[in-house]
Image: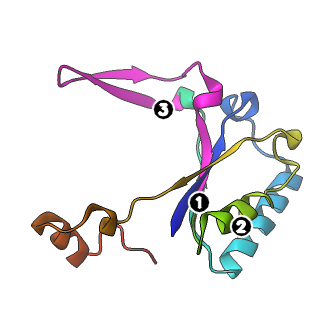
Amino acid sequence: MRFMIIRKADAETEAGMMPSEELIAAMGAYNEEMVKAGVMLDGHGLKPSVQGARVKFSGGKPLVLDGPFSETKELVAGFSIVQVDSKQEAIEWMKRWPQIDGHGEVELELRPLYELEDFGTSEHLDRMREVGFAKPK
């Protein structure tokens, strides 16, 4: 099962504050532990929403909205993709998140990823499988 661990944004991440050397070391150790355990597939931090954009469709027409976006608690500051045997195993990894991040005030969210198998079969899905689309590592 693949899951996305979402690190919610806060005032510091939205201000573009770079992490301390201590936090970089702690996150590096945490990520290295997950890589060595064979569960981490990918992970990245995201730049502040001021550098981003949203595209909203209304009546089929796109409207581009440039950041920043006001609801910080609804924004994503980073993510990790993990492959584990269960939701509970993913939660156990989340509990090990470095406590120094966000001065101990961090919100993480866990979401399962859809796999192609979740959608059944069709000619289009079969072609996607043939080319290796969304194939777990």
Q: Is residue 67 left or right of residue 6?
A: left
**Residue at the spot x=60%, y=69% of the render?**
86
Query: Horizontal placement of 59 versus 39: left or right?
Result: left
Query: Quarter-wise, where is residue 5 in the image?
Result: bottom right
Residue at numbered disc 2: 31
Q: Position of residue 73 (x, y in %)?
A: 65, 28
Picture disc at residue 52: 3
**Kind of element beneath mark 1:** strand
Q: Which circle, 3 or 1, is nearer the viewer?
A: 1
3 and 1 marks in contact (CB < 8 Å): no
Choose between 10 and 111: the one closer to the eye. 111
Looking at the image, residue 136 lies above or below residue 68: below
Q: Does the magenta-highlighted stretch encompass residue 103?
A: no
Q: Is residue 59 above or below residue 20?
A: above
Residue at image point 51% right, 66% down: 2
Q: Quadrant of residue 125?
A: bottom left
Region of the chain picked out in magenta, as a range: 51-80
Picture coordinates of residue 76, whole percent (x, y)? 59, 39
* Residue underneath mark 1: 43
Horizontally, is 35 left or right of 97 in the view? left
The reply to whether discs 3 and 2 touch (Cβ–Cβ < 8 Å) is: no
Is-magenta flag for residue 72?
yes
- Residue kind at label 2, given as amino acid type: Asn
